[in-house]
Image (cartoon, rainbow, N blue to C red):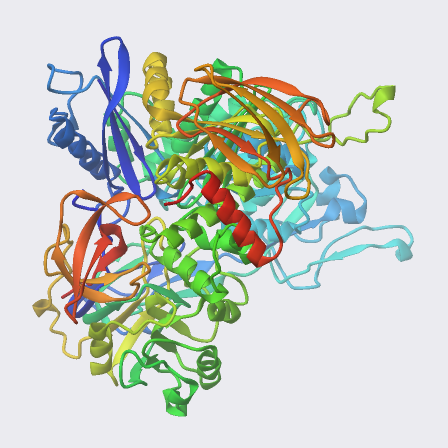
Amino acid sequence: MIVATDCGSTTTKAILIEKIGDEYRQTHRGEAPTTVEAPFEDVTRGVLNAIAEIEELSGRRILDGDRIITPCRDAKTGVDIYISTSSAGGGLQMMVTGVVQNMTGESAQRAALGAGAIVIDVLASNDGRLPHEKIERIRAMRPDMILMSGGTDGGAVTHVVEMAEYVSAAEPRPRFGVTYKLPLIYAGNKDAQPQVKKILGEKTALEMTENIRPVLERENLAPARNKIHDLFLEHVMQQAPGYKKLIEMAGAPIMPTPAAVGVIMETIAKRESLNLIGVDIGGATTDVFSVFGGVFNRTVSANLGMSYSISNVLAEAGLANIMRWVPFTIDEQTLRNRIKNKMIRPTTIPQTLDELQIEHAISREALRLALIHHKSLATGLKGVQQERTISDVFEQQTSGKTLIDMLKLDLIVGSGGILSHAPRRIQSMLMMVDAYEPLGFTMLSVDSIFMMPHLGVLSTINEKAATDVFVRDCMIYLGTCVAPIGQGQNGELCADYDIAFPDGRTVKDRLQFGDLRLYPLEPGGKAKVTMQPAKQVNLGAGAGVPVTREVQGGVVGLMLDGRGRPLQLPADQQSRVAALTKWHDAVDLYP
Amino acid sequence: MAHSYTPGLTVTERTIVRRRRVLPLPGKLLVAQGDRVRSDQAVARAELPGKVYPVNLANQLSIAPDEIKDYLVKKEGDLVQKDEILAENKPLIKWFKTEIRSPVTGTIESLSTVTGQVLLREPPRILDLLAYVDGTVVETIPQQGAVVETGCSLVQGIFGIGGETRGEIAAAVQSPDEPLTAAHLKPDMKGKIVVGGSFLPAETMTRAKELGVAGLVVGGIHDKDLRALLGYDLGVAITGTEQVGFTLILTEGFGTIPMAAKTFKLLSAHAGRKASISGATQIRAGVIRPEIIIPQATSSANSAVMQSQREGIRLGDPVRIIRDPLFGRIGEVSALPPDLQKIPTESEVRVLEVTFADGSRAVIPRTNIEVIEGA
């Protein structure tokens, strides 16, 4: 019997996990507003409220006043353990520094992002800002923590010491609390440790750890990430209202929400040896996770989201990019005003179909932009010398290529309100397909009711329970998308296909450019798909080369996407609306 | 799910507000508990450390970093004037002499023999923290600031831009559904807080700037006019530091929306009275809404009631609909069905029934209304 909470920036979500027979299952769920702010200023209030709701629903007694009853007293009282994640109060905000922006600067950024932080700025010796501008910038920011890196072990110390001097001169102050010292992690050239200690030892709560880039060719992020987690618990959380109590209540260390989601994503990828992209689209931020060839990356787009940050999606994507997904015409002024009204009243929900379609259009752009951001950071190491053979002569690849290869992608996992709570699951599937434009064969899934953070922290103490619940209650397979690469005129041949369904039924047909088709294929069901692409069209094996694959079903089914890759949308308004309407009807997207 | 409604905005004739005034860094307190303060009076003062300018002497003199002490004319802690010599070399031939002059007036804060640079700091800047409202100091926070309390009328807006300011309230329109046109603004409105009706067109903003109006309070504006006013597209609703010439407060939202009758009546009734306003809005992590505080003429603070925290929504509560298609309409809660209901998007949500003044009714998701507080 486990109770887990996630203290989000607006709501605290609690779930109850019970052992039923040999299996762990998620049984009840409660939710209450987060209480980090005045008048409560105690995060545990919201936690207790959310758990009280579970009590009401389950009939189980879990609370004794302000205390969670652990361990279980009998079949109807108490739980074995309580665990939690938190992103309340804006999450963990960090500033990182490096010497060369796209080398140690990026490594430091990856270390912080991987630990679940929001990186508010990256300072580097060569970032183009003048020294006094850097100092002003450090002063103006109020991070929860600073990570300093720079230099390889044994290399020059001047630049990293110079950066330490800037940080010292700026006298950075933490976001919460006036009286405590700002935690600062030094993970740069080990030879500079004594100087850094001399400069910053007094002014900050300084911690030394191994260099994140001991040599140019290798990143060593784990020690710095672990240090970030330790300091998050020891310093940052201690300052946030009520967290001391929360830490005492919990039976395992409190994790930053994105770090917990990252653990789950990494576990899925490892268990099934998949390449995956995961996304958690929230009201304020969009987190993207990827595992390619076993390499994990996480980025957070701090100002792309569906409520607080909705207006910023408009600002970044531009009106035309949002409008291209909307299957009707609406004047610019009305749309702009509606988006701003959602921003100032973030808790409202679409009440009419056209409002829902507008939100789905915006989410496509938020997802698309967050992935572009992710691709730019999920890269190989930059500045590394590459060995070239004679065959590479004509291929001028620079170091630091993105690791995201859509053709090698096996699975997309979606989470967050707009994807988890879409009225029809096909809506989530098409939002992700339109935003990410997967190539070839790609499976898609969503988090049923948003419980990945809870399961992430659970997996650190009870792997089996986390896996059971994840498989049975959390992950909902939507199905597989098959998207040939290539473009053509509407109605031209894209590919001929054969599908052998598990019940013995077969379908033989041709997919034309401009077609979107959907075949039901139940969860757990597998079908054999043979695609014979037209001669300029590629399904991963080369132009015109036939491909046969076994594909997985899901609650939506098997989607054949002949809309072209890159995706083609008609340029003029009238034919665009007609095309969108045709596609939406083809997959029964809206009522 | 007793909490599944949006806490509304307060519009009340009588309440007590406390405003916590805290310096961004430790400083000196200028008032004591029990003091009466005016809105434009400083309650605390801090010295903001000056800007830091690094000068790399080693590079400029072409010497090793650990040699810089031999070339310095000034010591750590010394005051320097702009263009005063910081360091120089002493060559045999005068022509080769290099002098490094200070780029700023300030002090030499530190020097480093590892990097060869000196850090110069400009003199501190005085920062006065104002009381913001006329009232009484009820609490002092050593070195940080004070809490000022006042008995007042309070109107919270939904969104604003621009910082704290004060001025006399001027009613410019006759009814809450009348737009505030440029012709409504008169030269004697300089330094005042002008209350309009349903909409603020771009020309009125320009006119307000010309006249030097301190604040504008209206029902709605168009997003495109806001963008033109700011010069950029506002992405995240964290405001309060904009400098557009006046402080702007919206009471309803974006578009042409008549100001709620209650808000309009209250503000119009106080025309001629002095008010403190702030456009600062923050919708994430600790909601801050823009506000208009009109301190009561007599200090009858004790007779007013502290705003109490609401627990939930009840039948008969006045509510505002905050999402299309009925955005901006105001009515009364007439039913609270407990079960989830399917709405046209196919989502199953908790709903309530609202009855409007004309007797018509509508079923609305509970998250799409806000209670008009302070009734």
Extreme residue toward the left, this view: B303
Residue B65 horizontal/vertical position (percent): 73, 39
The residue closer to the viewer here, B50 or B86, is: B50
**Residue appearing at x 27%, y 78% in the figure:** B176
Residue A243 horizontal/vertical position (percent): 29, 34
**Quadrant holding the C terminus of chain A:** top left
Drawn side of residue A23 relative to residue A400, left or right: left
Q: Is residue A429 above or below residue A152?
A: below
The residue closer to the viewer here, B185 or A237, is: B185
**Residue appearing at x 69%, y 59% in the figure:** B102
Drawn side of residue B217 relative to residue B111, left or right: left
**Residue appearing at x 47%, y 66% in the figure:** A333
Residue B166 horizontal/vertical position (percent): 33, 76
Q: Is residue B56 visible?
A: yes
Q: Is residue A489 above or below residue A249?
A: below
Residue A481 horizontal/vertical position (percent): 53, 29
